[in-house]
Amino acid sequence: MAYCYVFIDESGNYDFSNSGTEYWVLTSLITEDIHPGVLQLYDLR
């Protein structure tokens, strides 16, 4: 059985008052294998 990895990140202030941001962004990534990009992500750090 393969694993399913789900990563979700949000950006912005989810607030409908005047102090909230104009945009709220959700980004997601779903994969079965995280190994191909792990070293490249560590290099970005």
Image (cartoon, grey):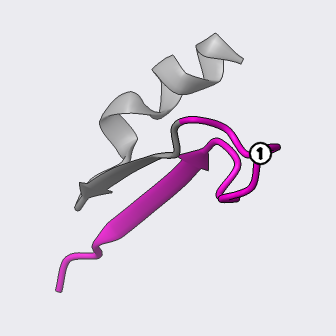
Q: Quadrant of residue 41?
A: top right
User: Up-down: is 15 above or below 19?
Assistant: below
Q: Is residue 21 left or right of residue 37?
A: right
**Residue at the spot x=38%, y=30% of the render?**
37
Quick one: which residue is furthest to the right in this view? 19
Q: Is residue 41 left or right of residue 26?
A: right
Q: x and y percent of residue 33 in the render?
A: 27, 54
* Mark 1 burial class by Cα count in 10 Å: few <14, some 14-19, many 20+: few
Q: Which residues are magenta?
A: 1-22
Quick one: which residue is furthest to the bottom in this view? 1
Q: x and y percent of residue 9 in the render?
A: 54, 51
User: Up-down: is 1 above or below 35?
Assistant: below
Magenta span: predominant SS is loop
Query: Is 41 part of what is drawn in magenta?
Result: no
Q: x and y percent of residue 4 in the render?
A: 28, 72
**Nearest the eye: 21 or 9:** 21
**Nearest the eye: 35 or 5:** 5
The residue pinned by badge 1 equals 18
**Residue at the spot x=65%, y=57% of the render?**
14
Give the residue type at disc 1.
Asn
